[in-house]
Structure formats: structure tokens, C-alpha cells
Image: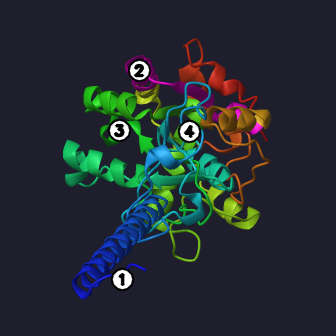
Amino acid sequence: MYFLDGKTHKKKSVSWRLLMVIIVGFCGLSLCFVRVGRRTLLKEAGLYGKDPVSHFHCPNILNNASNSIQLHYPRPKSYQRGECICTPVHFFVILSMQRSGSGWFETLLNDHPNISSHGEIFHRGSMQERNLNFIKRRIGEVYNLDYNSSAAKNVCTSAVGFKWMLNQGALEYHKEIISYFRKRGVSVIFLLRRNLLRRLVSILANAYDREAKLINGTHKSHVHSKQEAAELAAFKPTIKEDTLVDSFRKAVELSQNALKLFHGTRHIVIYYEDLVKNKKKLDQVQEFLGVRIVPLKSNQVKIHIQPLSDQIRNWDSVNKTLRGTEFEDFLADAEYI
């Protein structure tokens, strides 16, 4: 029988211990890498820490665009998107003019569970909002889902945008804005109004109420009851007929110029009168935005529903002024009661 001496046994024991240490160390490192990798994936999925999702971990990211819509995966700074982390978002903007039905139009869009339209984010009165850097920064907040307004959704937003009046800097910086829109895949909705005479009545009535505050001492641009609508519609403006045609021509020129400048963007032209007459137009808008088509409703009540002859104090003079001009059709008033 062969016996190991003490030194040989001791060497064997040390070797086994060293081997065990190596094995345990290797297992520990493997477990560490697995945990770190898992933590990284959780971070990227928005389920661990504050790191946003990596585009490459969202399914079908390269196959979910349709109708030339460019999709995005915003990374909000103020919150995490949670279960909506992989819901792609389409950017849009509504280009319009005051009192063209854009407020009502936005209430319809915001009735959709997946659309957030944040209203006018710029105002003519602020010089700061004429600064291009400020404009881009504010737009970026909207498209990054960091802009806070009543339109912000608590469910998965798949289309986000805002309303921009043509006299609020959109045309002033049109080259830079168009470049920005193309780069970020912003779709443009032109919302216009055909009957500029009705629009003018609405402008003058709204300006009057801003001073008079007819409803309980509060100015209201939009109302939600027939009683309030009747109170505002009781005011009949007097229109300056000597500047009427020129003002209409300027309004037409402004809208045509905007259409020409933004022609190269992905856009759609919608008229307020068509939306009122044909509810299917809303389906067209939803299709354009790439969202599922659902019935949309608004709680706003139309203010001026009477014939124009009953809403303009100096109707006879206005009628005479527009006869024989390119705006004579406005007098027919076959609109949308």
C-alpha cells in the first residue's frame, strides 16, 4: 500500500483550496455580470432607476411607421412613461388664425384618448416668445412630453402637438421652423376658415367681450351652454366697410403664403366649415395623425348661429361693399346652422 507523506498531502490540500477559490470567484463574477446586465436592461426599459428606454429594445421599431409618419420615443425629464415606454409618438402642429375654430377643433382632438394638443404655447404679447431659441425650447418641451397643460394624458399618448397662430412667429422664422419640422418629422395641420366675414364678426365680438365681460364679469372666448352663447351673440358689431376688402385680401395672402412656405412638409389642409358639415372629416384627421379612429365630441357651443344679416349692425353697407368683389360669396352665408 502506498501512503502519502505529510508534505504531499499538504500540497494537495492547498491546490484544492486554490481551485475552489478560483471556481467560487468565477461564479461570483458571472453572477455579478448577470445582475449588472439585468439591471441595465431594466434601466433601458424604464423599470429601474431614471434611465429612459433604448430604442433598440422596443419591438417593431423599424416597422411601425405608416403613411410617411415619423415616430419617436420621447424621454420625459419630469416622469417615466411606465407601461407606455414603447408607445411611439407622432409630432404635429396646428397652423391657424384667430377665430377660425381652432379652439373647438382642439377640444375634439383632445377627446381622443391618445392625442394631446396643448393649445397656444406662444402669445403675441411676449417679446421673449419672439426669440427663436425660446421657440425651439418650448416646442421641444411639448414633443418631449414635458409640457404641462390640461391636455396632457395619463394614458399612452401617441400623437402630441400644439396650436400656433400664423402671426405668432411661425412665418417670421419659417426657414428655421420648416427645417426643424422636417428634421423631427412634424406633421402640419392647416386649419383655415373660408368665410372671412363670419370670422371677422367673431373677432370683433370677442374683442368687445374682452372689455365688456358680458358673462358674470368674466371674458369668455368659448362657451359651453346655449344661454352663454346667446348672451355673447347679442352684441352686433359695426364693420368698417372702407377697409373690409383690403383686410380680407391680407388674410387670404397670409394663409396662401403659409401654405406655400410649408408645402414641403407633411401636411393636410382642413376648413372649419367642412368640419362642421361633415363629421367624416374628423376621421380623415385621425388617419393623418396615425391614431385609431374613434367618435370625437366637444362640449363647446357655437356662439354665432344666426344669419349674418342679423349679426352685423351695418349689414346693408357691408352687403353693398362686398357685391361684385371676390368675396361676394361670403354674403350668401349658406354655412352651418
> 323 and 121: which one is in front?
121
Q: Earlier in the sequence, mark 1 or mark 3?
A: 1
Give the mark toward the camera: 4 or 3. 3
Number of marks in the rendered image: 4
Q: Is residue 127 magenta?
A: no
Q: Earlier in the sequence, mark 1 or mark 2?
A: 1
Say what amino acid the circle numbered 1 marks: Phe
Residue bearing mark 1? 3
The local secondary structure at tag 3 comes to helix
What's the mark number on residue 167? 3
Residue at image x 24%, y 79%? 11
- Against 186, residue 28 (above or below) is below
Residue bearing mark 4? 199
Task: Find the magenta span and give its range.
Answer: 252-276
Residue bearing mark 2? 253
> 144 and 224: which one is in front?
144
Mark 1 touches mark 3? (CB < 8 Å): no
Q: Earlier in the sequence, mark 1 or mark 4?
A: 1
- Apparent side of residue 100 relative to residue 207 in the rendered image (left or right): right
Q: Report, in whole angstroms, how far the alpha carbon at label 1 lies from the one at label 3.
A: 101 Å
